[in-house]
Amino acid sequence: MSTIEAASAAFLQAIAEARDLNRSGADLNAIAELLRHARELLDIIEEEIADGTGATVRDARAVLAQLRERLESLERDVMPTTH
């Protein structure tokens, strides 16, 4: 398994756990920690992309964009907005 694959799998697990915690009414600090971890995993993927070449980089960038979108969606669901 490549670093990108491993980081992507760990990312998906982290946001699934955060979503489950949110649905169960868990402490926001625990959820925030999982979201920080997910962002760190995205950084790892981004670093791997920077070191890659060609089609692999294009594919990895597309995956990264999808993962970022999932994380941002979860953050909007979990974190209250202040006005």
Image: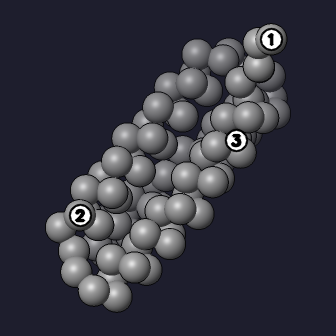
Residue type, numbered disc 1 = His
Furthest toward the bottom, the residue is 55
Crowdedness of circle 1 by 10 Å Cα count: few (<14), some, many (20+)? Answer: few
Q: In this figure, which residue is indicated by the disc labeled 3?
A: 74
Q: Is residue 44 left or right of residue 8?
A: left
Q: What element carries label 3?
A: helix
Is any atom of residue 12 visible in this view?
no
Q: In this figure, which residue is indicated by the disc labeled 1?
A: 83
Question: Closer to the camera: disc 3 or disc 1?
Answer: 1
Question: Closer to the camera: disc 2 or disc 1?
Answer: 1
Q: Is mark 1 on a helix, strand or loop?
A: loop
Q: Which residue is drawn at 61% across and 27% down?
A: 31
Vertical arrangement, residue 6 with respect to residue 15, above or below: below
Crowdedness of circle 3 by 10 Å Cα count: few (<14), some, many (20+)? Answer: some
Q: In this figure, which residue is indicated by the disc labeled 2?
A: 50
Vertical arrangement, residue 38 with respect to residue 48, above or below: above
Marker count (numbered): 3
Residue 29: quarter of image: top right
| Residue 7 pos. (x, y %) | 38, 58
